[in-house]
Amino acid sequence: MSTLAEGRNRVVIEAVTPEIDAGRFAIKRTVGERVVVEADVYADGHDTIACRLRYRKANASDWYETPMQPLGNDRWRGSFTVTELGRYLYTVMGWVDHFASWRQELAKRVLKEDIALALMIGAAWIEAAAGRAQGEGSKRLKEFAAALRGESDVGEARAIAADPDLDTLMDRYSDRRHATVYSPELAVVVDRERARFSAWYELFPRSCADGRHGTFRDLEARLPYIAEMGFNVVYLPPIHPIGHTKRKGRNNALAAGPGDPGSPWAIGSQAGGHKATHPELGTLDDFRRFQRSARQYQIEVALDITFQCSPDHPYVSERPGWFRWRPDGTIQYAENPPKRYEDIYALHFETDERRALFDELKSIVMFWIDVGVRIFRVDNPHGKPFSLWEELIAEAKATYPEVLFLSEAFTRPKIMHRLAKLGFTQSYTYFAWRNTKQEITEYFTELSHSETREYFRPSLWPNTPDILTEYLQFGGRPAFMARLVLAATLGASYGIYGPAFELLEHTPREPGSEEYLDSEKYEIRHWDLDRAESLKHFIARVNRIRRDHGALHYDWGLRFHGIDNDKLIAYSKCTEDLKEIVLVIVNLDPHYAQAGWLELPLGDLRVDPEQPYQVHDLLSDAHYLWHGARNYVELDPNLVPAHIFKLHRDLRREQDFDLLHVS
């Protein structure tokens, strides 16, 4: 930019938010959500400036604009709503508004000769705008200019200058030749609602039959059970052929016994690779039928994407350059010393055939999209190149913007966050290991109130086939109930690995291990879904509460509240307009009853501190009448270790308030 141009572009735009890594990455929203943008916008001197938020679909050429409002100290704010799937762009524009500056000065002038000269200057600004306008707009502006030039009464002249129609026209045809436009243009990736609000249920299809290897038809018969618990995503571990060479046995034994099915993550055999189904599960047509049946229950199917191969995978013989070869002429198997995964070959991403490898892996995802899958859970994405995921996800969503990707990356925070920035729709978290009040409060405050929330959508899992935490091993039924409530209400998206979770599986393979004894990863399990101790009805109630209360559909409304017992945690979620408030209190101690005094910020919740208000426990259906900010709560884990309250502010306006239920 030349020195002359810099002198004319007087407006400075800085500190734009949200902006991820200087615009390198996009923020995330779902259809119907607002994007609230702030920026520091100012200029030299005392002139008035105009500030606009500009936005458009990435594939469109025309920009929409909305005014930004001053917040004080040269900070401005504006917002727009994303209404379609895909990618949006937004930026901030500012310019010196000479007409607005003139109008402010006119109001301050008192000398008649000053006012007469000011009217001539104002008329000139209006005439210049008329030259930029066309048709009726140009005509009206010329009329305003003439009226100013011909007006001798100061009051009338000021009334003409303040006319709202003139203001609208001058804004529409403002002189933007020297406007400053923030660079780079910033991006928003807009997903469907399930990206923000979802309840996942993971299970092994091969364990869905009695006394034999399950099939897709058996899995289809399990759908009513999953639907009754209220889940809307069923996630399947890999459904591809399983290798035989170096197949693992039960409890991760290095050698398989007769009939051991092997790990589904050891992908590939003579029956095919990543674009085939395991013969014992059924055919591709059987899988399509299962998807159709799931849709009838409003359930989507999420498929595991695992970019690794068994020694029997067709890639091994067809594309040997895609693997890392050792000096002894063998292929390097996967390992994390002292753990050895001899049934799995990792792909070699530094190969000279990198382009062909990338293209093939992308084709796997596109193959299953063509089959009808729209949600993918990606196994260990942190073990593959970042560039692969950025390229793969961008290309898939360019054609199918409704596709969602869940990152299963229990790794270092910066790597988890990088994967989210690169395009993963949702991300696994450290929730499973956040157990104390302080740990939970600090972690979820970060996820819901820092810049992280703009790109990192958390998915909370109290257990997975790989994770059986110490808390679940020793906490009994109350621990499972508490962790379910925490996962389902702290996060708008959560999941469980079942039936292990609802049937309270809690025995580790060995002391100090987080691996399950008799893990389904290595054997077929047969579950008695009707066991008396099952949590299926409790899970169904929690999921119904989630479904029926919009405050739980979002992460950003989360607020923690003071309670004078570290074994109790209290937090609320509110809709943006505060019309609905859900208050959750959980006993983190699975062994003993705990009590405490809760402090609520009544002003922030728009609750009149002088009036009683009602809290309705959506788990027990009990109603309580509370007064003031400080109220007593007590939770016995042997009953229900949590309250999920709906808060009713004004009892006089609550049509559903029944005095018989107040306690």
Image: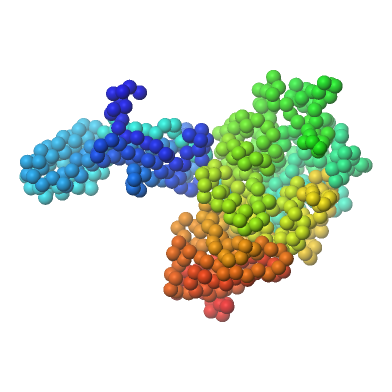
Colour treatment of the image:
rainbow
Rendered location of residue 511, percent (x, y) = 82, 52
Q: Is residue 21 above or below residue 80?
A: above
Please name whichever residue, 69 or 14, is drawn nearer the observer in this view of the structure: 14
Rendered location of residue 219, percent (x, y) = 76, 49
Q: Residue furthest right?
A: 258
Quadrant into which the N terminus falls: top left
Q: Residue furthest bottom?
A: 660
Kindly indicate the quadrant of the structure image that contains residue 635: bottom right
Please name whichever residue, 150 or 417, is drawn nearer the observer in this view of the structure: 417
Q: Is residue 150 above or below residue 504?
A: above
Count the numbered circles shown: 0
The residue that appears at 88% across and 52% down in the rendered structure is: 211
Rendered location of residue 42, percent (x, y) = 32, 38
Quadrant into which the C terminus falls: bottom right
The residue that appears at 39% across and 45% down in the rendered structure is: 78
User: Would you say residue 232 is visible in this rendering?
Assistant: no
Kindly indicate the quadrant of the structure image that contains residue 339: top right
The residue that appears at 74% across and 57% down in the rendered structure is: 472
Please name whichever residue, 141 or 566, is drawn nearer the observer in this view of the structure: 566
User: Would you say residue 381 is visible in this rendering?
Assistant: yes
Rendered location of residue 103, percent (x, y) = 19, 43
Q: Is residue 70 above or below residue 484?
A: above
The residue that appears at 68% across and 51% down in the rendered structure is: 433
Q: Taking 470 as reference, is 573 left or right?
A: left
